[in-house]
């Protein structure tokens, strides 16, 4: 009698002769049963009887691809040179009318402009003189410099509205920084969104520009309304 076992390593059903296995020693039978329980059979004897069952054969590799289950791609994956969650968030926020490819191209061009401007400004030996030329590091530092620490929230008490200062959560801080970069770059008078975006990144990297001014203004508003801070708990 033949008994059929399933082997994931070969993705085929392999027939094992029980009469032949009965002649083996108890130790070999025990090891064979353990291999069957774990889903892996010893392939040496099978390959000798039927060489077409080898996992290295092109036919078997093609069979593996045909039976492989398809998985949905990650929502953040795509044909992009930058695999970074903050960069993906920035691209999605800058996207307009569903044109994500255009938004991604603008972001990549802005990174190229940043690197070219740093090399032209500080020379080809900028990296050796501790001058940052990596555009992704400049981008992350610009976002960190633009993130506000505290904001204001409108709360009604006694029929009046008060601007109450509150500490901002991390995702809100990221959102405000990204929003300010996009709005200021779009309102610029220069031609080319990528050029204006690169300029704002470099300015924020050096703690300058309109994005840093917006952050300082928000902090000043929160500081001027600190007398109403107790309304957070009332």
Image (cartoon, helix red, strand yellow):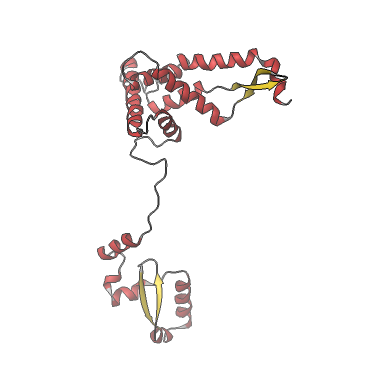
For the point 51% across and 16% down, the residue is 214
* Residue 181 place in picture, x, y as percent: 44, 21
State whether residue 208 appears in this view.
no
Looking at the image, residue 10 lies above or below residue 200 = below
Between 10 and 76, the residue placed more toward the observer is: 76
Of residue 143 and residue 163, the one placed in the foreground of this image is: 163
**Image quarter in which the N terminus is found:** bottom left
Q: Note whether residue 18 is visible.
A: yes
**Is 70 on the left or on the right of 158, as rendered?**
left
Residue sitting at the far front: 159
Q: Quadrant of the C terminus?
A: top right
* Residue 230 position in % (x across, y down): 72, 21
* 42 up-or-down from 69: above or below: below
Q: Position of residue 188 (x, y in %)?
A: 38, 15
Q: Nearer the viewer, residue 133 or 125?
A: 133
> Left or right: where does residue 113 sit relative to residue 230?
left
105, above or below 181, in the image: below
Give the quarter of the image for residue 156.
top right
**Residue 159 in the image: x percent, y percent?**
70, 19
Q: Residue at x 55, y 22 (%)?
A: 148
Residue at image position (36%, 67%) is 11
Quadrant location of residue 231?
A: top right
Residue at figure coordinates x 66%, y 15% from the top left = 225
């Amino acid at each position: 009698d033949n008994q059929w076992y399933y082997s994931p390593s070969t993705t085929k059903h392999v027939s094992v002769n029980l009469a032949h296995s009965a002649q083996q020693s108890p130790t070999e039978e025990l090891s064979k049963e353990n291999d069957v329980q774990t889903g892996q059979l010893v392939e040496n004897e099978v390959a000798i009887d039927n060489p077409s069952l080898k996992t290295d054969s092109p036919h078997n590799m093609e069979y593996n691809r045909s039976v492989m289950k398809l998985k949905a791609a990650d929502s953040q994956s795509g044909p992009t040179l930058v695999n970074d969650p903050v960069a993906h968030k920035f691209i999605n926020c800058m996207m307009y009318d569903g044109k994500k490819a255009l938004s991604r191209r603008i972001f990549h061009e802005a990174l190229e402009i940043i690197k070219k401007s740093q090399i032209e400004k500080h020379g080809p030996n900028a990296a050796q003189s501790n001058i940052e030329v990596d555009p992704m590091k400049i981008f992350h530092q610009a976002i960190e410099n633009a993130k506000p620490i505290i904001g204001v929230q409108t709360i009604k008490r006694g029929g009046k509205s008060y601007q109450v200062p509150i500490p901002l959560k991390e995702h809100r801080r990221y959102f405000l920084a990204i929003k300010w970069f996009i709005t200021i770059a779009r309102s610029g008078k220069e031609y080319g969104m990528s050029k204006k975006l690169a300029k704002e990144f470099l300015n924020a990297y050096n703690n300058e520009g309109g994005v840093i001014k917006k952050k300082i203004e928000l902090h000043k508003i929160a500081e001027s309304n600190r007398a109403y801070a107790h309304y957070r708990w009332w």
